[in-house]
Image (tube, helix red, strand yellow):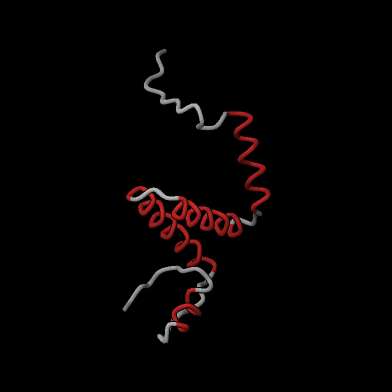
Amino acid sequence: MKHNKLVRDKIPQIIEHDGKEAIIRVLSEEDFQTELKRKLSEEVMEYSNKPSLEELADILEIIYASAGVLGSTIIELETLRKQKVQERGSFHKKIFLEEVKE
């Protein structure tokens, strides 16, 4: 069965443990960036169709990998997130902006 998609690091081992053969290749940095974007879209769609904590964890793992591609760490990402919360707030109050009048 063809998949042609980015998978977690241990997936080939899991496939082989099940008695099957995993045909893989290691992506170039450029291809990795492209596939991370594609994987993020896939996981966001899955979350949109069936919201779950598991899907959010998948999205978060892709975000962490994407931060690494950009040369940042999870700590730097979290620091930036907290800074934006301080400056612009979070989404906890469920505010929906309908219009801005001049």
Q: Position of residue 72 (x, y in %)?
A: 65, 54
Quarter of the figure that contains the N terminus = bottom left
Q: Residue at x 52, y 74 (%)?
A: 10
Q: Residue furthest top?
A: 102
Give the camera-side residue of 95 and 97. Answer: 95
Query: Residue 53: percent from the left, percent from the top?
Result: 47, 50
Q: In the rendered view, would you say 71 is above or below 88?
A: below
Q: Is residue 43 above or below residue 28?
A: above
Q: Residue at x 50, y 68 (%)?
A: 8
Expressed as whole percent of the image width and height from the top left, the position of residue 58 reads: 48, 57
Tally the marks: 0
Position of 89 compared to 44: left or right? right
Residue lying at 32% horizontally and 50% vertically, measured from the top left: 49
Taking 87 as reference, is 30 left or right? Answer: left
* Residue 54 placement (x, y as % from top left): 46, 55
**Does residue 30 appear left or right of residue 47 in this picture?**
right
Please identify the quadrant where the C terminus is shown: top left
Give the answer, above or below, for where 15 lies relative to 43: below
Which residue is painted at 57% across and 29% down in the image?
89
Query: Considering depth in this image, is 102 or 4 the residue closer to the camera?
Result: 4
When the figure is inspected, residue 54 is found, relative to residue 7, above or below; the finding is above
Frontmost residue, 1 versus 37? 1
